[in-house]
Image (spheres, rainbow, N blue to C red):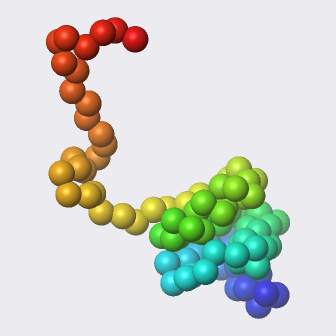
Amino acid sequence: MPQLCDQVRAACARAPGRHVVCDVSAVSSADLATVDALARMQLAARRAGSGLRLRDPSPALSALLQLVGLPGLGGLVIEMGRQPEQREIAGGVQEAVESGDPAL
């Protein structure tokens, strides 16, 4: 794990003030060891005056990060790389209102 933090610090030194992007798409198991490593990497980035972004985490890893509260600590940003589902309009959800629907 110290090697990961060293790599984060080196990346921060190459691009001061910019976020370090960590591609976690290959992380297959979401466990507390993974969360610990990410938290240490985030701390190393913050101490170097930067931040850490996670690219394309699995739903299980995202849920675990939310559960332990890591995204709220120091501005960890999670970048989701997903495609719109079939029948889903890219860019958001649109709702239709029926004229006979009661007001809430």
Residue 20 screen position, x and y as percent: 61, 71
In this picture, residue 37 sits left or right of residue 27 = right
Q: How many marks?
A: 0
Q: Is residue 73 visible?
A: yes
| Residue drawn where x is 53% and y is 70% of the image | 57
In this picture, residue 5 sits left or right of residue 77 = right
The quarter of the image holding the N terminus is bottom right
| Residue drawn where x is 73% and y is 54% of the image | 69
Residue extending farthest bottom: 3
Q: Is residue 49 visible?
A: no
Above-or-below relation of 16 to 11: above
In this picture, residue 48 sits left or right of residue 26 = right
The part of the image, by quadrant, that contains residue 8 is bottom right
Closest to the observer, 4 or 34: 34
Residue 47 screen position, x and y as percent: 82, 66
Closest to the observer, 19 or 28: 28
The part of the image, by quadrant, that contains residue 95 is top left
Residue 86 screen position, x and y as percent: 20, 57
The quarter of the image holding the C terminus is top left
Closest to the observer, 2 or 33: 33
Above-or-below relation of 61 to 4: above
The part of the image, by quadrant, that contains residue 9 is bottom right
Residue 16 screen position, x and y as percent: 67, 68
| Residue drawn where x is 45% and y is 62% of the image | 80
Above-or-below relation of 7 to 74: below
